[in-house]
Image (cartoon, rainbow, N blue to C red):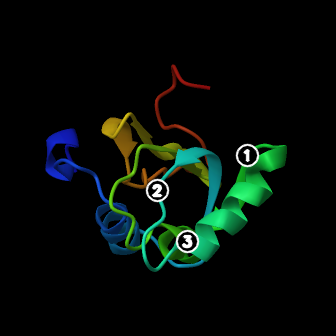
Amino acid sequence: MTVNAWGFPITGDRVVEALRTNFSTNDVWLLSDFDVPSGAKSQEILSHLRERMADGPLEVSTADLCDALAGAPQVWVLDIRLSSDEGVQLYIEDGEVFEESLDRAVRIRSIAGSRDPKVK
């Protein structure tokens, strides 16, 4: 997905769509920062996340993150990384996507090692 594909404003529902399309509801994210106005569906859940973040970043499932963002009219700040793969991330600042890599990298390593004699 390209940065331009997000459109403006970036709504909570747009982020939810991207997460649900690419990830399991049980995937765990490290939520470092967020600033989202409450939507009709999400006020209670967002309040709960804000309280939990008082002590710093927290881990949250895709399902919980989507529940919190659903219906939000705009996402001003969101900084998340997939706990199992830090290369998978979404960083929104001032309502714009600054970093987005929501594709899981396929990393295949042979247990026998490389076939190239120069690589040990």
Residue 36 at x, y percent in the picture:
48, 53
Q: Earlier in the sequence, mark 1 or mark 2?
A: 2
User: In the image shown, does 111 or 31 lie closer to the viewer?
Assistant: 31
Residue at the right extreme, as displayed: 55
Q: Amino acid at mark 3?
A: Gln
Q: Which residue is mark 3?
A: 43
Assess disc 2: are there few (<14), some (14-19) or many (≥20) residues with their C-alpha within 10 Å of its C-alpha. some
Q: Is residue 79 left or right of residue 44?
A: left
Kindly report which numbered mark, 1 or 3, lies closer to the viewer in this rendering: 3
Task: Spot the residue most to the top.
Answer: 118
Q: Residue at x 60, y 77 (%)?
A: 26
Relative to residue 45, is residue 118 depicted above or below? above
The answer to whether residue 115 is above or below residue 68 is above
Q: Secondary structure at mark 3?
A: helix
Q: How many marks?
A: 3
| Numbered disc 2: secondary structure | loop
**Residue type indicated by callout 1:** Pro
Residue at numbered disc 1: 57
Q: Looking at this view, is 57 or 42 the one in front?
A: 42
- Disc sitting over residue 37 in the figure: 2
CA distance separating discs 1 and 2? 19 Å
Residue drawn at the location 22% of the way across and 40% of the way down: 3
For label 3, the crowd category at 10 Å Cα-Cα, with few meaning under 14, some 14 to 19 and many 20 or more, is some
x and y, in percent, of residue 1 in the image: 22, 51
- Work out whether residue 112 or residue 77 is closer to the camera in this orientation and state it: 77
Using residue 26 as the reference point, say whether residue 36 is left or right of it.
Answer: left
Amino acid on which the number 2 mark rests in the picture: Pro
Residue at the image point whose x is 32% and y is 72% from the top: 21
* Quadrant of the rendering where the C terminus is positioned: top right
Q: Judge the density around disc 1: few (<14), some (14-19), many (≥20) Cα neighbours within 10 Å.
A: some
